[in-house]
Amino acid sequence: MKFGNKSFERIGFGGWQLGNSEFFDPMSIEDGINLVKKSVELGVRFFDTAPGYASGLSETILGLALKDDREKVFINSKFGHRADGTTNFEVASIEAAVNESLLRLKTSYLDSLILHNPSMDILKGKTQHFQEMKRLKEKGLIHHYGVSIDSYQELDAVLANTDCDVIELLFNVYSQSCIPLFDEIIKRNILLIIKVPLDSGWLTGKYNEFTAFKGIRSRWTVDDIYRRSNLTSRLKTMVGDDDLTKYALGFILSFDAVSVVIPGTRTINQLTNNLEALNYQLPNHLKSKMIQLYQDEIKNNQLPW
């Protein structure tokens, strides 16, 4: 995949978990640096992060790990949720926030800057956010800009009202509502980044109804867990395998609109498992069955994130 002046494989690195002890098991700075360096060694060139990830530590770790490889990697960061835990979408604060990210990332520019789940009025172009990001692009602080969003309604609004060339979207086997808009994304040559590709771990196949969840995953209700467990069991039967990772990632990569997928990565084992999907092509009959599963069981009764 080539976008702008950078090339990268279609499996990237999701940096939410880097150094993040608030929502996940603790990770030291040294372990985070080693993990990022190993990912570069294995061919990863796309890195996603945000100021709000681990109170800025995700960006800091990436900056330390990538400083010698900066020109061959693509770094996407965000605006809206700050390193101090506050939320601030004020247009006037975008440039200052970008400069803070640049300091942590030890770089002079972001390959892309995206608004971190902004409100619908912003997505409908009723504010000056995109004009300000265009100005920062002309200034050289960022090379591309866009949004991180979750739903069909949000994606439809962005495509209808903005000129952004980067969209980060929640999309996976259990969340397929945006597929009808993929042709427009291709037509406009938008960089489509896929977040939450493994449904926060369910689509690896490692969870079931008896799993004890903690941290960020404790958000699920008993009913949520039961539904996801049932769906996951059906997927395992469908593909004939208990490890669902390559099938789940393969499903996403089977769509031409998708530029890069950013599974969250905490260990070398997760990293290598994710990258194996690059060598796997999901058969059409399995893709059709996965789409049908969504149509029958989820479309009219969406799973909460």
Image (cartoon, grey):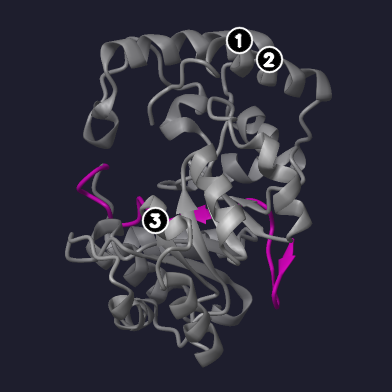
- The 10 Å Cα crowd at callout 2, few under 14, some 14 to 19, many 20 or more, is few
Residue 238 counted in the magenta span: no
Label 1 sits on a secondary structure element that is helix
Q: Which residue is mark 2?
A: 292
Q: Which residue is mark 3?
A: 121
Q: Quadrant of residue 236?
A: top right
Q: CB under 8 Å between callouts 1 and 2? A: yes
Point out which mark residue 296 bears: 1
Q: CA distance from mark 1 to mark 2?
A: 6 Å
Point out which mark residue 233 bears: none
Label 3 sits on a secondary structure element that is helix
Q: Quadrant of residue 219?
A: top left
Tell me: 119 left or right of 195: left
Magenta-drawn segment: 1-24
Q: Amino acid at mark 3?
A: Asp
Q: CA distance from mark 1 to mark 3?
A: 33 Å
Q: Earlier in the sequence, mark 1 or mark 3?
A: 3
Residue 14 counted in the magenta span: yes
